[in-house]
Image (tube, helix red, strand yellow):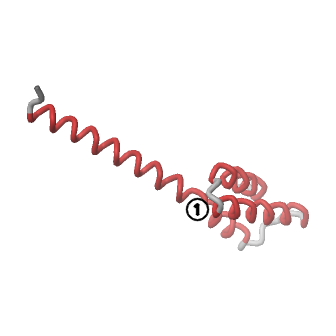
Amino acid sequence: MTTPQTTRKLAAALAVGAGLAFAAGSALAHGCPGEMKAIDAKLATNPKLSEAELAKVKTLRSEGEAAHKAGNHDASMKALGDAKKLLGI
């Protein structure tokens, strides 16, 4: 037999769990656009890179955006992370 106190504890635990799941999903979904913005901001400062490095950054940035749009966020974050490393951010 459940008591009102047990019911409240269960409801609170479920609410916390649902909130954490939502927050984690939101954070992952917004990771890729944030990384792209950081790359774009750094590119706007005309970083001192060779032409080959700059081309690689732009290619990785483009690949990251394409992967994000396709729903492949792991590949997107990998490509964007590699671009950020080349930019020193």
Q: Position of residue 27 (x, y in %)?
A: 49, 53
Q: Is residue 11 above or below residue 28?
A: above
Q: How many marks?
A: 1
What is the quadrant of residue 61 in the picture?
Answer: bottom right
Q: Is residue 26 above or below residue 50?
A: above
Q: Name the amino acid, label 1.
A: Gly
Pick the front one: 63 or 70: 70
Quarter of the figure that contains the C terminus: bottom right
Question: In terms of secondary structure, where does tag 1 sit?
Answer: helix
Pick the front one: 54 or 27: 27
Residue at figure coordinates x 34%, y 46% from the top left: 18
Q: Is residue 44 above or below residue 71?
A: below
Q: Residues within 10 Å of mark 1 (few under 14, many from 20)?
A: few
Quarter of the figure that contains the N terminus: top left
Q: Position of residue 72 (x, y in %)?
A: 65, 54
Query: Residue 41 vs residue 57: left or right?
Result: left
Pick the front one: 24 or 47: 24
Residue at figure coordinates x 15%, y 36% from the top left: 7
Query: Residue 10 vs residue 30: left or right?
Result: left
The residue that mark 1 highlights is 34
Which residue is most to the top? 1
Residue at figure coordinates x 58%, y 62% from the top left: 34
Residue at figure coordinates x 21%, y 41% from the top left: 11
Q: Position of residue 47 (x, y in %)?
A: 78, 67
Query: Residue 9 vs residue 71: left or right?
Result: left
Q: Position of residue 83 (x, y in %)?
A: 75, 57
What is the quadrant of residue 54 in the picture?
Answer: bottom right
What is the quadrant of residue 86 in the picture?
Answer: bottom right
Query: Residue 57 vs residue 51: left or right?
Result: left
